Image: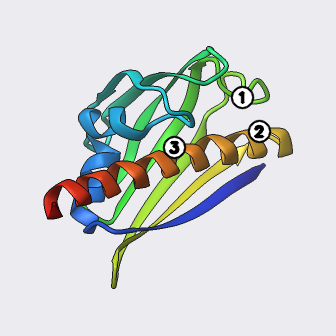
């Protein structure tokens, strides 16, 4: 098993970031690696609740991932199971992995650490690193645009 760990420093309070990573409305703003909109997002944000996100990538392929919220400590942490329903990394098939997002207040806003663990192999790790990297870049752009609107 292998994992991906990514860190981003975001100019927004942890509560703002938490809302974007945990609500269907927020997920539609940043999920998926490319600059395409999320086609649908559902989330019952409670321990035992489920999520499902349907998005498209630049190559025209559609992907659906789903899972269960395993632990939630607002606005500091979300842990969820992760499974590809369709599309996704072929190496993962229907395997279940684990995603953790940790939010820590810092001087400029929030440090977000995303860990995607229990991936099957190096090819899957690289695929998920690219996917999550692109998604987190979209999250940062979304929050920067929000900051510009609130200060402008």
Q: How many marks?
A: 3
Write the residue at 24% across / 58% down.
148
Query: 88 above or below 103?
Result: above
Q: Position of residue 12 (x, y in %)?
A: 28, 66
Question: Can you identify the residue that label 3 sits on?
Answer: 135
**N-term-proximal mark, 2 vs 3:** 2
Residue that extends furthest to the bottom in the rendered view of this protein: 107
Residue 73 visible in this rendered orientation of the protein:
no
Query: 138 above or below 9?
Result: above
For the residues labelled 2 and 1, say whether their Cβ atoms are less than 8 Å apart. yes
Query: 43 above or below 11?
Result: above
Write the residue at 70% across / 54% down.
3
Q: Is residue 96 left or right of residue 14?
A: right
**At numbered mark 1, what does the secondary structure look like: helix, strand or loop?**
loop
Q: How is the image coloured?
A: rainbow
Write the residue at 50% across / 51% down.
136
Question: Can you identify the residue that label 1 sits on?
Answer: 89
**At numbered mark 2, what does the secondary structure look like: helix, strand or loop?**
helix
Q: CA distance from mark 2 to mark 3?
A: 16 Å
Query: 58 above or below 130?
Result: above
């Amino acid at each position: 098993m292998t994992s991906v760990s990514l860190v981003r420093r975001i100019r927004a309070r942890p509560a703002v970031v938490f809302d974007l990573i945990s609500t269907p409305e927020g997920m539609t703003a940043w999920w998926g690696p490319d600059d395409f909109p999320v086609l649908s997002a559902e989330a019952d944000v409670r321990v035992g609740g489920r999520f499902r996100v349907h998005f498209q990538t630049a190559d025209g392929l559609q992907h659906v991932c789903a899972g269960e919220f395993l632990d939630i400590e607002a606005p500091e942490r979300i842990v969820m199971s992760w499974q590809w329903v369709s599309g996704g990394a072929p190496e993962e098939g229907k395997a279940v992995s684990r995603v953790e997002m940790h939010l820590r207040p810092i001087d400029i806003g929030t440090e977000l650490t995303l860990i995607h663990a229990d991936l099957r192999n190096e090819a899957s790790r690289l695929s998920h690193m690219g996917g999550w990297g692109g998604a987190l870049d979209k999250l940062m752009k979304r929050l920067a645009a929000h900051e510009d609107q609130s200060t402008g």
